[in-house]
Image (cartoon, grey):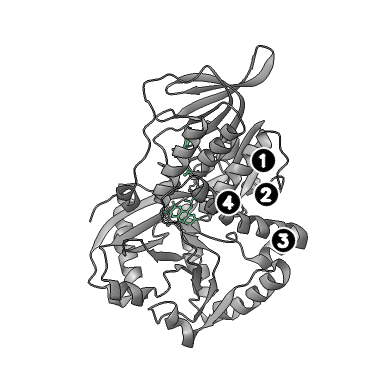
Amino acid sequence: MLEQNYWLTTAEFPAPNADVPPPEAVDVAVIGAGFTGLSAARTLAKHGAKVAVLESETIGWGASSRNGGMVLTGMKLGVNQLISMYGRELTRRMYAASLTSMDCVEQIVREESIACDFSRCGHLEVACKQKHFDDYARQAEVIAREFNHTLRVVPRNELSSEIGSTIYFGGMVDETSAGCNPARYVAGLARAALQAGAEILEHARVQTIQRESRQGETGWKVTTSRGSLWAREVFVATSGYTGSATPALQKKIIPIGSYIITTEVLPEKLALELSPRNRMIYDSKNYLYYYRLTPDRRMLFGGRAAFFPENEQTIRRSAEILRRGMIDVYPQLAGAKIDYVWGGTLDFAFDIMPHAGQIDGMYYALGYAGHGVAMATYQGQKIAELIAGDRPENPFVGIPFPGARLGLYNGKPWFLPLAGAWYKVLDWVS
Ligand SMILES: Cc1cc2nc3c(=O)[nH]c(=O)nc-3n(C[C@H](O)[C@H](O)[C@H](O)COP(=O)(O)OP(=O)(O)OC[C@H]3O[C@@H](n4cnc5c(N)ncnc54)[C@H](O)[C@@H]3O)c2cc1C
């Protein structure tokens, strides 16, 4: 088994010139070369802005190349909870935006001819308890009534048409969700941004950002490990890897580890039995599993096997935990070899919502809570349009962005073991 991201073995990334110093001045400095930052850079460059994307590692190094490639509808929170937090009208706009975010990915893939196996294969949520299944009908009814969007509830006795597992109490299908190869997608986004005229600087960790005027214009001095530049605007797109260069955001985001294994390539007949309609699948627990077939017929199986962000130890431990979880779901895979294991960091806000807008005078978008493939692409584009002077519809701008209660959080998530234990308790009792 290789401790390596399988997707990276399938993708080719552009390699921008590493020897050039940063430009002296730009209209917008984008921090982070993932879906958010690259989607923003592409849009800004197409609007004629001079853009530099500053990335501390390499293109797509963060969650954007490491994820399950599930292009999902909706947000992490259920619709009833959203309505109780924001009311019907704003929730309706948020839900519409989450559907549009998938169209946004599809449109970019088409316009830029990105070969990333994008396919509207739909997703399946499976119920781990009878009461979770009972709730599906209620959710589908609210979503149909309030948002005019159709979900199909699948009772237990019909579930074999969707999944080759007998452990679940039923399921719910959304036909509009999609799947893609995320590493190929983020590499394609980078190519599109470069082609539109943006500059991408790899190994350029942003260390400090300070207010500085230049030729009478207010802006920012951005100091990186490759030198400094002046920017009229700064867009922070650092997601779960947000650090001390932007302390106000760091305090609002909890970095949480998520881990994935992939099996060897499976025989065609077995793959068809496991996932007859090739869905993106996840279960109804808080401590959930998500899984899918890769385009070359491996089972990709992910979950929050350890809560802490990825390191050698958490990755190794996760491989065995996930293998056991996968066999609980699919006993047919007991003999399947695990070829790859890797981890990545998710970005959770304290209210588990995406957030975007301005903080301390800088633009930002983050808080995707495991639903970032579509939403990060969309937010990158929308915030770029805002910076370019348009007034795009974006219901996530301006919603309250809570920090830790009593301010007891400095960006170092000491409470993660407690949170992990708490989620396990919730899964027993709810
Ligand atoms: C294991 C895993 C599975 C997931 N599965 C799914 C899924 O199936 N579907 C889904 O919708 N979402 C999924 N997600 C979430 C999704 O991948 C993220 O929400 C999305 O990739 C966020 O994109 P981003 O561009 O905002 O951030 P990232 O891709 O994380 O990019 C942030 C970048 O910022 C850079 N950076 C940080 N600090 C600095 C600095 N000071 N200077 C310069 N650069 C800096 C980092 O190096 C990094 O490359 C998953 C995430 C993980 C980890």
Residue 108 place in picture, x, y as percent: 53, 48
Choose the circle earlier in sequence order: 1 or 2. 1
Residue 167 seen by the camera: yes
Q: Which residue is mark 2?
A: 396
The residue carrying pointer 1 sits among few (fewer than 14), some (14 to 19) or many (20 or more) residues within 10 Å by Cα, namely many
**Label 2, label 4: how many angstroms apart (C-alpha)?**
16 Å
**Label 2, label 3: how many angstroms apart (C-alpha)?**
12 Å
Choose the circle earlier in sequence order: 2 or 4. 4
Choose the circle earlier in sequence order: 4 or 1. 4
Q: Which residue is mark 4?
A: 104
Q: Secondary structure at mark 3?
A: helix
Residue 147 place in picture, x, y as percent: 70, 66
Q: Quadrant of the C terminus?
A: bottom right
Residue 350 place in picture, x, y as percent: 60, 51
Q: Amino acid at mark 4?
A: Cys
User: Which residue is found at the position 44% from the left and 48% from the top?
Assistant: 114
Viewer-proximal residue, 169 or 264? 264
Of all residues, the one furthest to the top in this rendering is 215
**Label 1, label 2: how many angstroms apart (C-alpha)?**
8 Å
Q: Are marks 1 and 2 in contact (CB under 8 Å)?
A: yes
Q: Which residue is mark 1?
A: 357
Q: Secondary structure at mark 2?
A: loop
Q: Amino acid at mark 3?
A: Arg
